[in-house]
């Protein structure tokens, strides 16, 4: 739904929700989310996700992740592998700290904790984008259907 029509449709849903709840949505955040009872499995899913690698290699400005302990120098080998088209090697070289900084990974409780951190800093509408074990994520976060790890 990355088309102009799709974006307009999503904006319409947000406006409809604003009216129904009598509140204004000012800040929206898409949150790449990989949920799994096994934290390492959740992280590996993100590391292999093509869009994540693209963002990390070509979109994020240099030094963006320094406050999370990931220097531009540390990302350099991963970016070089990406530019050569060696996706498996680029995935292998992604620092865990980069995954933890840019994605929500782990158990349902961890995911909800991270979402609440976003809300505390002003996100009005968190949009969770599950990848990997999507059935687990959807089942875990469904109202009244909380799974525990």
Image: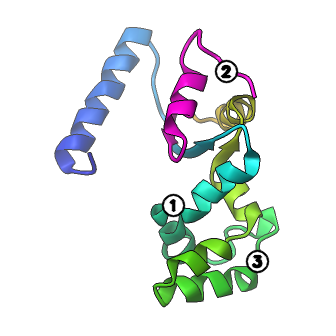
* Contact flag, marks 1 and 2 (Cβ < 8 Å): no
Query: Mark 1 and mark 2: span between their CA atoms?
Result: 25 Å
Q: Is residue 105 above or below residue 23?
A: below
Magenta-colored stretch includes residue 133: yes
Q: CA distance from mark 2 to mark 3?
A: 36 Å
Residue 59 vs 36, above or below: the answer is: below
For the residue carrying disc 3, how many other residues have a C-alpha within 10 Å: few (<14), some (14-19), or many (20+)? some
Q: Earlier in the sequence, mark 2 or mark 3?
A: 3
Residue at image position (74%, 43%) is 38
Q: Where's residue 121, x and y in %?
A: 69, 38
Q: Nearer the viewer, residue 5 or 135?
A: 135
Q: Is residue 10 left or right of residue 82?
A: left
Return the disc, 1 or 2, that comes first in the chain's sequence: 1
Quarter assignment of residue 5: top left
Q: Secondary structure at mark 3?
A: loop
Which numbered disc covers residue 147? 2
Residue 44 percent across, percent down from the top left: 65, 58
Residue 49's mark?
A: 1
Distance of label 1 from label 3 (alpha carbons):
21 Å
Answer yes or no: is residue 125 visible.
Answer: no
Mark 3, residue position = 71
- Disc nearest the viewer among 2 and 3: 2
Mark 1 vs mark 3: give the one in front: 1
- Which quarter of the figure is the N terminus placed in? top left
Label 1 packing within 10 angstroms: few (<14), some (14-19), many (20+): some
The residue shown at (58%, 35%) is 123
51 part of magenta stretch: no
**Disc 2 packing (10 Å; few <14; some 14–19; many ≥20):** some
The reply to whether residue 107 is visible in this rendering is yes
The residue stretch that appears in magenta:
126-149
């Amino acid at each position: 739904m990355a088309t102009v029509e799709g974006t307009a449709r999503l904006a319409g849903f947000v406006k409809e929700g604003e009216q129904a709840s009598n509140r204004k949505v000012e800040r929206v955040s898409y949150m790449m989310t990989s949920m799994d009872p096994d934290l390492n499995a959740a992280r590996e899913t993100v590391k292999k996700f093509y869009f994540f690698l693209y963002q990390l290699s070509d979109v994020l400005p240099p030094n963006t992740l320094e406050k999370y302990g990931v220097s531009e120098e540390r990302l350099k080998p991963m970016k070089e592998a990406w530019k050569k088209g060696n996706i498996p090697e680029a995935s292998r070289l992604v620092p865990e700290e980069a995954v933890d900084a840019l994605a929500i990974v782990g158990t349902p409780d961890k995911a909800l904790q991270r979402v609440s951190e976003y809300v505390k800093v002003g996100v009005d509408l968190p949009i969770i984008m599950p990848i990997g074990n999507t059935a687990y994520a959807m089942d875990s976060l469904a109202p009244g259907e909380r799974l525990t790890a």
